[in-house]
Image: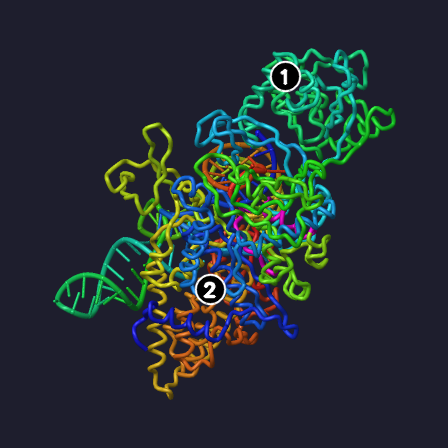
Amino acid sequence: MSRYDPSVIEPRWQEAWDEAQAFAAVRDPSRPKYYVLEMFPYPSGRIHMGHVRNYTMGDVVARTKAAQGYSVLHPMGWDAFGMPAENAAMERGGHPKDWTHGNIADMKAQMKPLGLSIDWSRELATCDPEYYGQQQAMFLDMMEAGLVYRKAAVVNWDPVDMTVLANEQVIDGKGWRSGAAVERRELVQWFFKISDYSEELLAALDGLKDWPEKVRLMQANWIGKSRGLQFAFETVGAPAGFESLEVYTTRPDTLLGASFAAISPDHPLARALEGDPAVAEFVAKCRRGGTSAEEIETAEKIGYDTGIRVRHPLDPAWELPVWIANFILMDYGTGAIFGCPGHDQRDFDFATKYGLPIKAVFVAEGAEDAALAEAFVPMKSEKVHYVRGFAGAEVQTGDEGVAAAIAHAEAKGYGKGVTKFRLRDWGISRQRYWGCPIPVVHCPTCGVVPEKKENLPVELPYDVSFDKPGNPLDRHPTWRDVPCPACGAAAKRETDTMDTFVDSSWYYARFTAPRATTPTVAAEADYWMNVDQYIGGIEHAILHLLYSRFFARAMHKTGHLPAKAVEPFSALFTQGMVTHEIYKTTDTQGRPVYHLPEDVVRSESGATLKDGTRVEVIPSAKMSKSKKNVVDPMHIIASFGADTARWFVMSDSPPERDVEWTSAGAEAAHKHLARVWALCSRIGEMPADHVGQGDDALRRATAKAIDEVTKGIEGFAFNKAIASLYAFTNTIAKANASTPVMKEAIRTLAQLTSPMTPHIAESIWSYQGGEGLCAKAPWPKADPALLIDDTVVLPIQINGKRRAEIGVPKDMAIPEIEKIALTNEDVLKFLAGQPVKKIIVVPGRIINVVV
RNA sequence: GCCCGAGUGGCGGAAUGGUAGACGCAGCGGAUUCAAAAUCCGUCGCCGCAAGGCAUGCGAGUUCGAGUCUCGCCUCGGGCACCA
């Protein structure tokens, strides 16, 4: 066997796999299937370490399952619509389509050398009409099923560029390009009725046993089911039509702590008051800035006293002022609240700022009613003493108090208990070119008319320009102006395109029949769905995964997926992110400029660009294109090979944890592989009749390695599987066993390592007489008899501190163990004659002597 | 601001409530070499000559026993509905 040279063996084995069509997914009803999917990438043009880590994890699972006899589906595609393509067109010219396809070709060329066991014949890109045309067909079906509607919603409006901005494009309340102060503006937009499924999406989380608990918790909080009281305040001095003000509260037990009512600046009452210039000015002030919750909730809390009053439902003589407040969201509850500063920190801050009364409704058990320095917000499950209660016991939990208050309101008739969800309908309209066109036409007589299915796909026109801001579809007459599909009169196409989250909400289903002329094919979807193992970043914990869960339900409702696929991902693994330091300088206008790690020279004293410019080093954060803190895996593959890169990303860190990328260690991974190669060579040169003393020990070590590596892979503890492989390699290297046992051990090592380092595994496998491709060989099984040790070492603690240890046969009876422990020399020394109070023996684990 | 995580040697990390630091990196010592690289062997939490003591972000608590469970903090990261 010659020197370990990945540049020779890797292409060779990749070719061998291709020839054998080793990774083609075959629908074979006689075998169990296994569908493993990694979140598909945005085609930025360069793969980064996060990709390598993500796809290697999926590949390890796919290869292991294939070896275990499953019919495996392991596809790959491209989440190809989105803003960066348009930004590139604006910044550098060119066309989003060409840019995207070029990037796909580049990225694919970078992924291929990794030797992933992907069925490339199923490759798809969401920007291809073959894909998005089927998405349009489903949109029409969903429209017919009542899952699509239009309504007004706020967007970030750049008043200089006269265009809608993404939240990402709003920096400190200003447009990223124009620098103009952004405002919130309403547009009529398209929505999916995800709220029809709020209850179901929440309830079904309990069934997702193989999802991380934290993801289920995040989704549950996002859906935000709450039980509260809805009631109407009677108004005093309000304009006609506003005789009452509906409010919703999850804390009706604090009603007697109310000190004001507050409405959203977008509330109809606020609009009605805008005739007053002072109100108009205040509301305009509230609308300044972006639409993101983060921006709204961290903005300074401001209010405006309308002069209108409302009567307290429990005491008509008690009037509360009505304020307009910028932190009340129109799309949660009724857009109006009552403020209880005693038990809500936001209300407390507001009341303090505007001199409104602050009274406690309840106090901690045993405490006295007193002035509050901050809002008192105990857990609802905690018992408190109601000093201004009006329903239920004087001492009760918050939950009991809420229930009693709702019962009180319903009995007296001033309000009713309602269940609300925080989850809002999914706004899918984007005023952008590079997305899936919404297939409807606006007709002056017929109104909104769906495009005919036979006219799909509604293809994006190629002849567009990005020299001015805004959506090029809006100013493309030959594409935009079409006859109405219903009456034939002159009409206009919808120029909004779909949110790219729509594209990624069903690609997993499309992979089961990627070339079909319908969105899915029943037989294929029936066989392959669900995804048995989905792998991706934790940053997708809420939006992508929740939208996909909804979309699968919508696809089932419209006949595109079987009932069993409404939860499309049976098991989910969220990998940690690959992080890296960020390098920043500032341009002449004070704007930040980011630099690629490869352009930065790092030294002990800091960092500089190659020309010597000092660079600010910002602590590690998620690798992102905008911050340019990305590392190119290609140079590692070029100098050490794919197996080294794959081994390194799997060994470096537990997969669910973030990993800080450092270049140290890649070399070590390579050294290890070279050592394995040399070991294989040495065993290959052993005389066939060599007899060693260590056969039994090596057989045991082999069984142990099979057991540990298999458990490690199946439990997504790849770093531990790799630790076992290191240990096993060392054991083989030091073993003195007979030639056949040595060969058996190294072949097993090759198989166990093949999911991580498939190329070197094939070389070892074939060199040591393995039959066929290692990738096609059945996964080794450990002989259970070899996994059991006859003796165990038991540590002895005295008062919880380890003082001694004894070796005993594994099934020794407890009284006998106690006897040995108490006569142990070291134990006697530490006991120093003190009487033993208690002795605890945990069989096979530990002995603790208590004095 | 709200929701969710994570913090263990110089570094990445391991540890069904049961020997804290497996495995790897870096370091240190040695072998080999004319020399170096590569390779191999050994050593390696901190304090201490040792006995021993101290150690899992900080502070309490539960337990025979806590990195692990509970409560309260601190720091860092993710998400917050138009980044993907």
Comparing A539 with A243, the one in front is A243
Q: Which residue is mark 1?
A: A351
Residue with the most extreme front position: A489
What secondary structure is the magenta-colored segment mainly?
A: helix
Q: Which residue is mark 2?
A: A116
Comparing A572 with A153, the one in front is A153
Which mark lies nearer to you, 2 or 1? 2
Give the number of the disc on residue A1.
none
Question: Residue B37, relative to residue A738: is it above or below?
Answer: above
Q: Quadrant of residue A725?
A: bottom left
Question: Residue A337, relative to residue A606: is it above or below?
Answer: above
Segment tinted magenta in the rendering: A532-554
In the image, what residue occupies the spot 81% across and 18% down?
A314
Comparing A609 with A178, the one in front is A178
Q: Residues within 10 Å of mark 2 (few under 14, many from 20)?
A: many
A760 sits to left or right of A309: left
Q: Amino acid at mark 2?
A: Leu
Question: Residue A238, relative to residue A767: is it above or below?
Answer: above
A780 sits to left or right of A482: left
Magenta stretch encompasses residue A285: no
Q: Chain of mark 2?
A: A
Helix, strand or loop at disc 2? Answer: loop
Counting the numbered discs, the total is: 2
Residue A744 visible here: yes
Magenta stretch encompasses residue A547: yes
In x, y percent, where is residue A112? 43, 63
In the image, what residue occupies the spot 40% across and 56% down?
A106
Q: Chain of mark 1?
A: A
